[in-house]
Image (spheres, helix red, strand yellow):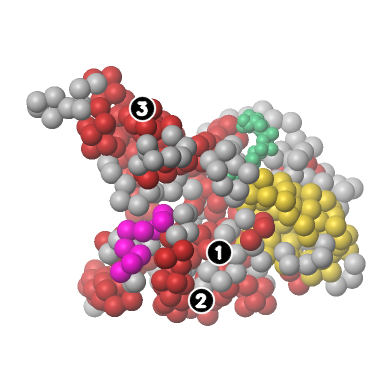
Amino acid sequence: MTAIAEQDTLRASARDWLAANFPPALKGRAYAAMVDQEPALQADLEVWRQRLAAQGWGAPTWPTQYGGAGLSHPDAKVVQEELEAADAFNPIPALAGMGVTMVGPTMLEYGTDDQKARHLRGMASGEIRWCLGLSEPNAGSDLASLATKAEDKGDYFAINGQKIWTSGADISQWCGALVRTDPSVKKRDGISFVLMPMDQAGVRTRPIPLISGSSPFCETYFDDARADKADLLGKLNDGWSVIKRLLQHERQSQTSAGRRKLDNEEPLQDLAKRYVGSDADGSLTDKDLRVRLVENLMADKAHSLTVARIRAEAQGQVKVSAAASILKNSATNVAQGKAELKMEIMGAQGVGWEGEAYEADELASVREWLFGKAASIYGGSFEVQNNIISKNILGLPETTQRG
Ligand SMILES: Cc1cc2nc3c(=O)[nH]c(=O)nc-3n(C[C@H](O)[C@H](O)[C@H](O)COP(=O)(O)OP(=O)(O)OC[C@H]3O[C@@H](n4cnc5c(N)ncnc54)[C@H](O)[C@@H]3O)c2cc1C
């Protein structure tokens, strides 16, 4: 059978499987189920999670022995297209926190067989949520300055220190953390990456409220917390190599949308016509807005086509590299520009926080606009991505001080 014929067969079987297994109540309700966590949808969401996990489609490109479906990237794309065509969605990457998108792919590359066997299935099924303890009060962009220390205690490390901005730390079962294992050498040469359970006496979390109304991240304190030696990911004192790869996976995961999509989201041009009005010929009455809106739509299209071209050129291999920094910044620009335009289009209706005067999509939009500000900070700030692009892609000289 040709590759195309095989994909057609996969597409047809994916369509049939979705028709039989995707709970109809969740159709087009990803945002309501996952972000708003509507109680009426939670039972269906759990059934859907279990079915997807059994199919290996939570992390479709992972090997079957680790809970994936062993699909090639082009085949996984076919499944994704069919999910979208059915107005369905894959909740598992979000349920696994930083597991499926970041810790898992890094573990596939750097992990021992024992680590893969113990950890990957829980991520691929969305049952075990992972957080990432990287940033500290004095180590954000300059991550190598981190001070959380790990002391060798024989068969485990004792971890002491503080992390900050740890997304989902209060609801995660496991954490991948960057810790200092040798303070006597150059900053980057004395860091290791460890995996540790969050449910232990030495770990305490304190949620930090966000301007968008939710509290997605925490301060995380380690007070003689324990990470088993068997859970050292990569080599001792080689955590910098591990984290560089993990951060590329993080940026890669932030290259497509740049923001969460609302349910049944109205195209921006239709929204503009509805709020601002159109001429007899159907053009937006506000010409200046029309120009800026078209610029954003074109940038969005150019970004999506570039992502598609890179995927096609990689022939399904999807190798992460410094180029992810370009795409992360481009996705952020498009998404933040779109959110600004949406607010402008909605006018006073677009800045409401609560109350009957506002439609549900207006209230959701203001929260997404505020949350979207974070996109140029998390995963490495906009400026830091530009530094990576200038050094690793353009070959320009290093401008920042290194210890
Ligand atoms: C929503 C959200 C979720 C997050 N989740 C996590 C998480 O799960 N785990 C985790 O460990 N961290 C997380 N972070 C933290 C994030 O990685 C850091 O906020 C980010 O790396 C920036 O570090 P900082 O906040 O310390 O800012 P700083 O590093 O202090 O930067 C402050 C400003 O200075 C600029 N700047 C700094 N250095 C340079 C330079 N060399 N050149 C040019 N400009 C520079 C920055 O661009 C920024 O504008 C999250 C952040 C957000 C907003």
Residue at image coords 81%, 56%: 222
**Could you classify mark 3 by the number of other residues whose Cα lies within 10 Å: few (under 14), some (14-19), or many (20 or more)?**
few
Identify the residue position indicated by label 2 in the image: 67
Of residues 61 and 166, the one nearer the viewer is 166
What amino acid is found at the position of numbered circle 1 in the picture?
Ala
Residue 208: percent from left, percent from top = 67, 45
Task: Mark yes or no: residue 81 visible.
Answer: no
Q: Please report the bounds of the magenta region as a residue range.
A: 24-32
Residue indicated by mark 1: 96
Q: Position of residue 243 (x, y in %)?
A: 66, 53
- Quadrant location of ligand 1? top right
Q: Is residue 363 visible?
A: yes
Left or right of residue 303: residue 399 = right
Marks 1 and 3 sit apart, C-alpha to C-alpha, by 37 Å
Q: Which residue is mark 3?
A: 347
Q: Is residue 125 above or below residue 193?
A: below
Q: Is residue 376 left or right of residue 172?
A: left
Going 13% across and 30% down the picture, which residue do you hit?
282
Task: Give the number of the mark in front: 3 or 2.
Answer: 3
Quarter containing the C terminus: top right
Element assignment for label 2:
loop
- Residue drawn 70% across and 53% down? 133
Q: Secondary structure at mark 3?
A: helix
Residue 359: x percent and y percent? 35, 42
Mark 2 or mark 1, which is nearer the start of the sequence?
A: 2
